[in-house]
Image (cartoon, rainbow, N blue to C red):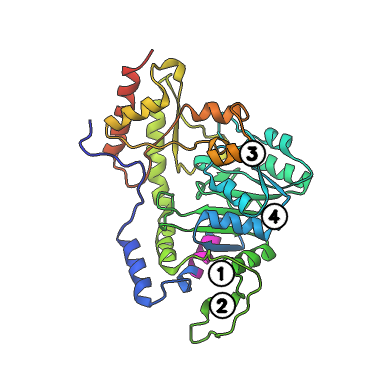
């Protein structure tokens, strides 16, 4: 057993990251400025889109994209129940109603057949969530959206680096929101990015992200700037800062290396856990390049004498941190009470939730950390095998 607790998730912060942030501090640009714009430019180039708008969170990006697309009171937006609450919260923030479509039990992503069942004359958008870094069936989603004239906003909080049929996520839907939270594949502490090829949509998002000020407002304190600005919309304070962007620039430069470590850990987990009938390893469909933001292990509970909660407690005794992704949104009190959801409304999400555990997987982990996780899981399975 380990002597020290293995934290579930940590960012990889190295000297180059620190130097980039210090450079920003010394430049006196600590809010939105030149590094933010450079980060936007480089991220757009990496993804392969025309426009990237840096924001202070993926949640902000999702909200801005919905507002810019005209989603408002009386509309319905379809998303998955197997996601963090922000994917649904932003729908409510626009005045629209969240509608949940159940998941594919294998990938845990939204089931396109279930989406079709939930479309009504009020439906205006779909928010597919690329859970854990595995892409949704985007061709089918885009075909459905075209058929019903729906806006597609991809929640790519887990999906920096993810590909679908050779295309990087961020290039397929009408807009895509990424997360750079502390534990994400590319971390800026807090932060996010919205990508799109729609110029009008990008302009609206950019303006709305900084109080609705005219686009020249960001550099009004520079020698070439002007004090004058205009409020074009009642916008939000959602912009990224140069301190965050500085970290984003250095993280983006080494993303491929960090992804290589994630892949090595995931492959080692798959090798070990794939041999055990009590466990089900994450899928990677033939059309997918998995970002391995999360390693979600499914327990075959009928082969074990303990449940998921007890399995987590046993891992904690082994000094291994874990998490669960996610408690289905309709199970949370606000959504259950407001919309009258009941047990059985989303059977695939509900039954999947009861048997999933997210194991540590991040580039700061050592080979010994990886082996410690494997050995702990093996000991628990052997000790509680039916």
Q: Give the mark nearest the N terminus, 4 or 1.
A: 4
Spot occupied by residue 372 in the image (x, y as percentages of width and height): 28, 33
Q: Earlier in the sequence, mark 3 or mark 4?
A: 4
Q: Vertical placement of 16 versus 164: above or below?
A: below
- Number of residues whose C-alpha sits closer than 10 Å to that of mark 3, classed few (under 14), some (14–19) or many (20 or more): few
Q: Residue at x 73, y 34 (%)?
A: 117
* Mark 4–mark 2 distance (CA, rounded to whole Å): 26 Å
Using the rendered image of the protein, determine whether residue 287 is visible from the camera's viewpoint: no
Q: Residues within 10 Å of mark 4 (few under 14, many from 20)?
A: many
* For discs 3 and 2, the disc positioned in front in the rendered view: 3
CA gap, disc 4 to disc 1? 19 Å
Dots 3, 4 in contact, CB < 8 A = no
Q: Secondary structure at mark 3?
A: helix
Earlier-in-chain disc, 3 versus 2: 2
Residue that label 2 marks: 217
Residue 157 among those drawn in magenta:
no
The span from disc 3 to disc 4 (Cα, nearest Å) is 19 Å
Say which label, 1 or 2, has the lower sequence index: 1
Distance from the alpha carbon under mark 1 to that under mark 2: 9 Å
Measured as percent of width and height from the top left, residue 223 is found at: 49, 87
Span colored in magenta: 37-45
Secondary structure of residue under mark 1: loop
Q: Residues within 10 Å of mark 1 (few under 14, many from 20)?
A: many
According to the image, label 1 marks what residue? 210
- Considering the whole magenta stretch, tell me its main secondary structure: helix
Query: How many callouts does the rendering have?
Result: 4
Q: Which residue is mark 3?
A: 339
Residue that mark 4 sits on: 71
Q: Is residue 173 above or below residue 376?
A: below
The quadrant of the picture occupied by the C terminus is: top left
């Amino acid at each position: 057993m380990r002597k020290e607790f293995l934290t579930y998730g940590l960012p990889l912060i190295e000297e180059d990251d620190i130097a980039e942030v210090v450079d920003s501090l010394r430049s006196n640009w600590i809010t939105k400025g030149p590094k933010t714009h450079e980060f936007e430019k480089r991220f757009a180039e990496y993804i392969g889109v025309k426009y990237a708008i840096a924001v202070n969170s993926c949640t902000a990006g999702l909200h801005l994209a919905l507002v810019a697309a005209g989603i408002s009171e009386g509309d319905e937006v379809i998303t998955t129940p197997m996601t963090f609450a922000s994917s649904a919260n932003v729908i409510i923030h626009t005045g629209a109603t969240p509608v949940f479509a159940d998941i594919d039990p294998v990938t845990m992503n939204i089931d396109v057949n279930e989406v079709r069942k939930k479309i009504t004359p009020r439906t205006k958008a779909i928010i597919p969530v690329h859970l854990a870094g595995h892409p949704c069936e985007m061709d089918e989603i885009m075909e459905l959206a075209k058929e019903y004239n729906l806006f597609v906003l991809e929640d790519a909080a887990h999906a920096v680096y993810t590909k679908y049929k050779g295309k990087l996520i961020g290039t397929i839907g009408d807009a895509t929101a990424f997360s750079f939270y502390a534990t994400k594949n590319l971390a800026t502490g807090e932060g996010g990015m919205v990508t799109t090829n729609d110029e009008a949509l990008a302009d609206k998002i950019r303006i709305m992200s900084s109080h609705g000020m005219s686009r020249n407002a960001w550099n009004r304190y520079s020698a070439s700037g002007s004090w004058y600005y205009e409020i074009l919309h009642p916008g939000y304070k959602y912009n990224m800062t140069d301190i965050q962007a500085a970290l984003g620039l250095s993280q983006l430069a080494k993303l491929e290396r960090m992804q290589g470590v994630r892949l090595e850990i995931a492959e080692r987990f798959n090798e070990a856990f794939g041999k055990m009938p009590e466990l089900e390893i994450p899928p990677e469909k033939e059309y997918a390049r998995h970002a391995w933001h999360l390693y979600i292990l499914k327990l075959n509970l009928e082969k074990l004498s303990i449940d998921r909660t007890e399995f987590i407690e046993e891992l904690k005794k082994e000094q291994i941190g874990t998490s669960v992704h996610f408690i289905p949104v309709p199970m949370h009190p606000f959504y259950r009470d407001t919309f009258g959801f009941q047990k059985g409304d989303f059977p695939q999400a509900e039954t999947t939730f009861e048997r999933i555990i997210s194991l540590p997987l991040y580039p700061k982990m050592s080979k010994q950390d990886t082996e410690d996780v494997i050995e702990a899981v093996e000991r628990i399975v052997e000790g509680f095998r039916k």
